[in-house]
Structure formats: C-alpha cells, structure tokens
Amino acid sequence: MKQLIAGNWKMNGLLAAKAEVVALANALKGRAVPEVLVCPPATLLRALIDTVEQSPVRLGGQSCHAKESGAHTGDISAEMLKDAGASYVIVGHSERRTDHKESSAEVAAQANAAWRAGLAAIICIGETDAERASGRMQDVLAAQIDGSIPAAATAQNTAVAYEPIWAIGTGKTASRADIEEAHAFIRARIEAKLGAAGRAIRLLYGGSVKPSNAKEILHAKGVDGVLVGGASLKASDFLAIIDGAKLD
Ligand code: PGA
C-alpha cells in the first residue's frame, strides 16, 4: 500500500483556512503522490469537499462517538463524518485520551463505529515521557494495542499511528532509532494479535514531524506514513512533508 501522509488540524481552522487546502489540492493535481489526508475540524468538512474532489486529497474527522445517533450533546457520529465528506477518522488520539478520559475500550468502540459508517480508522497509541523513562513503554503500547484495536482490523479499514506523547507539539521528535524500535515492537504485537492482516496494516509515526525531518522518518524501517499536527496547517509545509514520502 502507498504511504499515508495525514494532517491533523486539531482545534485549528476557520473557513479562511480553505485557502490552504486549495493550495494543497492544486499543487498535487496530476502528480504521483502517496495517499494524502487532511483532518480538519468537522465544521469545515462540507466546505472542503468540492476543493478536494478532483485531487488526490482525502478528508477525515478527528474523533467520533461510538453510537450512530442519540442523546449525546456535542458529539459527532462516524455516520455524520461520512455524510459530511470524510473517508477516515482518527480515534484514540492522546489529546482525546487525556482531555476526554477516553479509554482503550472506548477507542475500540469508536473504530468499530468508523467501520460501520464506511470510514477507515487511524487508531493512535503512544507512551508518556514518564512511562518511557521508567521502562514501561512496551507494556503501555501492548495494553493500548490489545485494548484499542478490534480483532476485525485490516489494512483496508485501519492504520495505526505511533505517537509518543512527549514528541507531540513539543518540537522534540523521536530519533530514527527510537521510531524503528517502537515500530518493530508494535508490528510484532499487531501481527501476534491479528495474524496476516496485522502484517499489512500501515503503521504511521506522529510527533513533531516537519519538513526538515519528514524524509528521514518516512524512510525509516517500518514506517508506512506520518500523522502530522502543527506542520499540516500550512500547505507549503505539508507539501514539503509529502515530498519526503517513498513512492514505490
Ligand atoms: P504535532 O502533532 O505534529 O504538532 O507534534 C502530532 C499529532 O498530535 O498528531
């Protein structure tokens, strides 16, 4: 499968930010590209559909409720994201796990909801600084993999994003060796859990990916793409990251 370059805008972007997606879509038209995904706030999805339609850019949501509809004030269902133009949804981002106390069981339910709606899920996992420093990184990742990735995950409906929390929004990127070590561990665990399907699921790295380090990360062993926060907000930066992808 192609590498996946996904942008997570988080709680950033008013309608004027459409100009960045217009620039991105125009720059990528007719080019050989990896798979490119932009996950803006859900309020912008509908406004961006026409912009990306004739381009390789796909749209995604940043989270979803596990239920299809109902009395859940302020929440958005996977079906609503699909209806608004999304083809992916990020679930289990560390900011959701922290700010909204989402458990791995809830994240798994959200991934199931994504599939029910016809969306692919990007399931996020990652350890804190303290967990790494105390030698618990592998236990934390194993528990998140076991709890957050449903058994029906396949390469078509799922990508897994390894996002060490200490590298998110800090400018502190994990080293190539750290990334390769974590990805090898995660791959083995996913394969043990899912068998052949686990071998083909794309494994993304996220955490302070930027134009200056994207190429090295995207060429690291076991890296099938990146999940980019801050540097996905500007088309010029995101394009420079996309340029670092492997195209074979
Ligand atoms: P960052 O965020 O690139 O701004 O570090 C990554 C993420 O949280 O997905």
Image (tube, grey):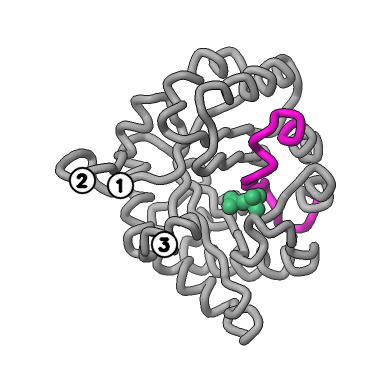
195 above or below 27? below
221 above or below 116? below
Please say whether residue 15 is visible from this viewpoint. yes
Q: Is residue 228 magenta?
A: yes
> In terms of image quadrants, where is residue 24?
top right
Chain-order first, disc 1 or disc 2: 1
Residue 107 as seen in the image, left or right of residue 47: left
Between residues 61 and 182, which one lies in front from this camera angle?
Answer: 61
Residue 171 as seen in the image, left or right of residue 96: right
Residue 200, position in %: x, y? 58, 51
Label 3, label 1: how many angstroms apart (C-alpha)? 14 Å
- Disc 3 residue crowd, few under 14, some 14–19, many 20+, Cα 10 Å: many
Label 1, label 2: how many angstroms apart (C-alpha)? 8 Å
Residue 42 as seen in the image, left or right of residue 105: right
Between residues 130 and 227, which one lies in front from this camera angle?
Answer: 130
- Camera-nearest label, 1 or 2: 2
Q: According to the image, label 2 marks what residue?
A: 72
Label 3, label 2: how many angstroms apart (C-alpha)? 22 Å
Q: According to the image, label 3 marks what residue?
A: 148
Chain-order first, disc 3 or disc 2: 2
Please say whether residue 205 is visible from this viewpoint. no
159 above or below 146? above
Q: According to the image, label 1 marks what residue?
A: 65
Read off the magenta span.
219-239
Q: Amino acid at mark 3?
A: Ser
Chain-order first, disc 3 or disc 1: 1
Q: Secondary structure at mark 1?
A: loop
Residue 12, position in %: x, y? 54, 38
Q: Secondary structure at mark 2?
A: loop
